Image: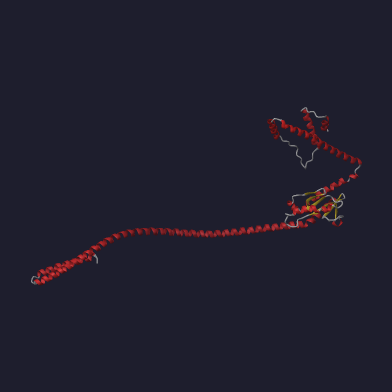
Amino acid sequence: MDIITIILLIAILAILGFSFIKKSGLSENKSDEKLIQENARLTADLSIKDKKIGELMEEFQAQKSEKDVSNGENKQLSIKIANLESKVSQLEADKSRLDKEKTILEQTESDRENKYKSDITTLNSIKNKIESDREKEIKYQQDKEIARINGMKETWKQHEKNVEERIKQICREKDIEYIDKEKIPFKGKPDNTIKISDKFVIFDAKSPGSDNLENFPKYIKDQTELVKKYIKEENVRKHIYLVIPSNTVNVIDQFSFNIGADYNVYVVTLDALEPIILSLKELEGYEFYDQLAPEERDDICRIIGKFAHITKRRIQIDQFFWRQFLDTFSKFGDMPHDIQEKINEYERSEKLNPPQEKRVKSISIKELEDGNQKIKKEAEAKEITFPDSMHQMLDE
């Protein structure tokens, strides 16, 4: 029951009570007993009504208090609701912003994923191309190496034949006797034999047995010992040549072997055959000593004897001066320490640069004579006197 209803009931009850009292007063003709009874009844009714009104007032006050409390709570709730609505609005705004960002991120992620897939496809394509190119390069290098090895093997296979054909060609061109294997007058049957000045010169062709060249130097060294069987034969020259393929030179570290006092072995290539054979042919001219006239023999012996005397005399003189130099050096130790240090300082600062000898240039006799005359003039300018024998030597 609300407050307005309670108030209306109280008002109605009050009007009814006052109306009943007024009617009772007007009915004076009623008996007193009835009046008393009626009054008692009305009094009881009023008491009940008053009690009821009190109860209603208490209820009214309780409901009013509850309403006030409810109004306060409603106000707080309204404030909370307003705050919540504000938060909801902010959350909705944030949600809207986040939805936009999510859409952008999803689009960006999609673009990124598409780009990633595209990049992966490109990288795979590049990777496949690189792998393909690498495989082609490896195959090319392998084929090239196989071709090189096959070429080397073919060269080595044909090496013995090529050496034989080249030596025969040189012998035909230079009028040198080539001895066929069936006609070699000694044991062993070397690959190639030529005859110069009644001496047999042996050229043995040697090539690797496989494409592994690591053992080839040892193989060549072993062969230098095995050719000793040829040296034992009569009229065989004590210089034997082992002819190797040109493409194996880079693994050979020794090209000359002096096997004691018995013989020498030389490791040569195909392109060196012609100059070697021509050099051997030039030696043929020295074999005709017996055909020289006595005067020619005497001239040769006289020149060689003079060279021998000059050489020995020069060695003798040098040895004399060496002893004098050493004796003089030994006396330097008796000098004061500071002077010795000064001498050592000047000695370290000195340097002699004698003329450099070159293989392609011979020593000119005219240059030596001009040098002698220059020394003579410098000595005269410095008033240096030479013995008569020295003057004669310089003049000559």
Q: Viewed as shown, does residue 330 lie left or right of 33?
A: right
Instruction: Mark yes or no: residue 172 visible.
Output: no
Is residue 223 rendered to the left or right of residue 108? right
Expressed as whole percent of the image width and height from the top left, the position of residue 307 reads 84, 38
Taking depth in this image into account, of 148 and 383 the one nearest to the observer is 383
User: Relative to 391, does residue 286 appear above or below in the rendering?
Assistant: below
Residue plotted at (9% across, 69% down): 26
Q: Nearer the viewer, residue 67 or 328?
A: 328
Residue 334, image x, y percentages: 72, 31
Q: Quadrant of the C terminus?
A: top right
Residue 297 in sight from this viewpoint: yes
Count how many numbered circles sit on residues in the image: 0
Q: Residue at x 48, y 59 (%)?
A: 107
Q: Is residue 271 above or below residue 19?
A: above
Q: Is residue 173 left or right of residue 135?
A: right
| Residue 382: x %, y % from top left | 76, 28
Residue appearing at x 62%, y 59% in the figure: 131
Q: Residue furthest left?
A: 29
In this rendering, is residue 17 above or below 112? below
> As displayed, is residue 51 above or below residue 152?
below
- Which quarter of the picture shows residue 117? bottom right
Q: Residue furthest right?
A: 294
User: Colour scheme used in the picture?
Assistant: secondary structure
Q: Quadrant of residue 331?
A: top right
State the residue at coordinates (76%, 33%). 327
Where residue 270 appears, x then y in whole percent?
Answer: 78, 52
- Say which quadrant the N terminus sits in: bottom left
